[in-house]
Image: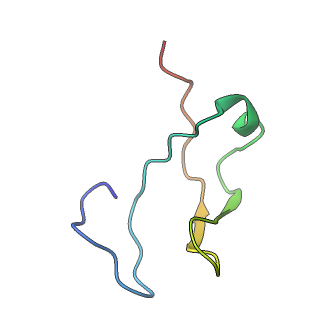
Amino acid sequence: MEFEPQLGPGETADVRLAPLRPEQWQHLKPGDVVTMHETQPAAGIAEIIEVLPPRA
C-alpha cells in the first residue's frame, strides 16, 4: 500500500502491483478488475487505475 501502514476489512488503499511475469499482464488496462489470490478465500479485488511500462 502506498500511504497506509495497514488495511482493515472493507477499507481501500492505493496499491502498486509488480507482477512476477509482466508478459502475462500486458493485456490489462485502466478500469480492469483483478482478483488477489494470496489467501483462500480471495484476499480482495483491485481496479487497475494506471499501467506503466516495465522498468529497464
Q: Residue placed farthest to the top in the image?
A: 56
Q: Residue placed farthest to the front in the image?
A: 40
Q: Where 21 sits versus 53, above or below?
A: below
Percent position of residue 22, x then y: 65, 31
Q: Where 51 sits versus 2, above or below?
A: above
Percent position of residue 32, x then y: 71, 56
Q: Where 52 sits versus 43, above or below?
A: above
Percent position of residue 37, x then y: 63, 66
Q: Residue at x 30, y 54 (%)?
A: 2
Q: Residue at x 45, y 87 (%)?
A: 10
Residue 36 relative to residue 1: left or right: right
Image quarter in which the N terminus is found: bottom left
Q: Residue at x 48, y 19 (%)?
A: 55
Q: Which image quadrant for residue 41?
A: bottom right
Q: How many marks?
A: 0
Residue in the foreground of this view, choosing between 33 and 7: 7
Describe the colour scheme in one phrase: rainbow
Residue in the foreground of this view, choosing between 39 and 10: 39
Residue 10 relative to residue 25: left or right: left
Q: Residue at x 69, y 62 (%)?
A: 33
